[in-house]
Amino acid sequence: MINSRTAALHQLHRALITSPEPVPDTFFSLNFQDQPFGTAWGYSRPIDTALHSQDGNERAFLMPHFSFWAWKLPFVGSITRSAAAIAKLELTSYPEFSDKIPRAVWRGTAYFNSVHSPHLRQNLLAATKDKAWADVEALEWVGGSGGGNDHQGHNATNALAIEDFCRYRYVLYTEGIAYSGRFQFLQMCNSITITPPILWMQHTTHLVKPIFSSHLLAASREGGRGSGAAARKPSGHKSWPVSYPVDEANIVFVAPGWSDLEDTVAWLEAHPDVAEGIAGHQHDLFVGGGYFSPASEACYWRALVHGWSKVAIVNDREWVGQDEVPYETFALSNGY
């Protein structure tokens, strides 16, 4: 947890000292747990409003993940390092979507599941076992039992460098206890991200435009291209009510238990123009649009401070007599 805190404070400090205009003074707290807590700034919130507190979304202020500064996992590093590695890999080795390995890839800790999807990862392992179209393995950790914040320094014998996921046409995303911090790394690939409907929102998750596998597969029965070239359709899913057409979609949502994953991959392989388009939409938005760039992240932090300062209620008397500490001094000792 100390690494997450250190990263977040460095992120915020970088945003403040590079701001072209003054940022308002305010008071706030930071939450580094997977799940939101009170009014503290956090990494994610449930997308389903039924899972929120009585106060709902208006009390959820999301901050960028700590990996925008650095992630101690040796096969990840940081967003900046990974972005450069992915760009080099795709430019030199996989300049076209068709050049990529025609398989679906995943690595992860099998038991990191949400209470809302308690068998998500085990179901994925079962659905892909011994399948030629899948490169899916549970991580075999060395020196620890998992890859969360408590085990950030550990390695896994079968891990892939985060950029190596972009060698594949299909990258599989699984949420963990809540969100998964690897999502933004996968979104930098010129590949198709495939996942069950997302349950946890991070600070850029609202930008995804899903096409549901049920609409893709229905096209096979109807003899069509999938989802309609210009029509959005009701998805039947409360939290993601729209299934986007292939000309807009930048991610594919499959059944919650992965039951149609194999059929979905087969459909995409049989329709390479559609598959390439969906992959390109993701890459063009998140990489071409600069959403994961250091400049964008810093801009978001400043907007977060501005927005928070307008609604935060502070009892100034609680801070009377409290000594302030310059950030540079705090950073030297990490608060100890």
Image: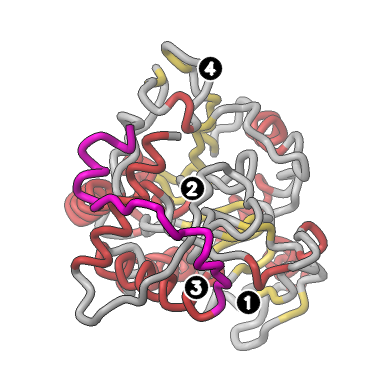
3D distance between C-alphas at marks 1 and 3? 32 Å
3D distance between C-alphas at marks 2 and 4? 24 Å
The x and y percentages for residue 216 are: 67, 66
Name the N-terminal-most of marks 1 and 2: 2
Tag 4 and tag 1, C-beta contact below 8 Å: no
Tag 1 and tag 2, C-beta contact below 8 Å: no
Instruction: Give the left or right position of residue 226, taking residue 5 as reference.
Output: right
Q: Which residues are magenta?
A: 311-336
Above or below, comparing residue 183 to residue 206 in the picture: above
Above or below, comparing residue 256 to residue 138 in the picture: below
User: Which mark is nearer the camera, 3 or 4?
Assistant: 3
- Quadrant in which the C terminus is drawn: top left
Q: Amino acid at mark 3?
A: Trp
Residue 159 vs residue 268, the one in the foreground: 159
Residue identified by numbered label 1 = 244
Q: Amino acid at mark 1?
A: Tyr
The x and y percentages for residue 42 are: 53, 54
Q: Residue at x 20, y 56 (%)?
A: 91
Q: Is any atom of residue 269 visible in this view?
A: no
User: Which mark is nearer the camera, 4 or 1?
Assistant: 4
Query: Magenta segment: does it hold 110?
Result: no
Residue identified by numbered label 4 = 145
Name the N-terminal-most of marks 2 and 4: 4
Above or below, comparing residue 30 to residue 6 in the picture: below
Q: Amino acid at mark 4?
A: Ser
User: Which mark is nearer the camera, 2 or 4?
Assistant: 4
Q: Residue at x 54, y 69 (%)?
A: 314
Tag 2 and tag 4, C-beta contact below 8 Å: no
3D distance between C-alphas at marks 3 and 2? 35 Å
Name the N-terminal-most of marks 1 and 3: 1
Residue identified by numbered label 2 = 171
Q: Amino acid at mark 2?
A: Val
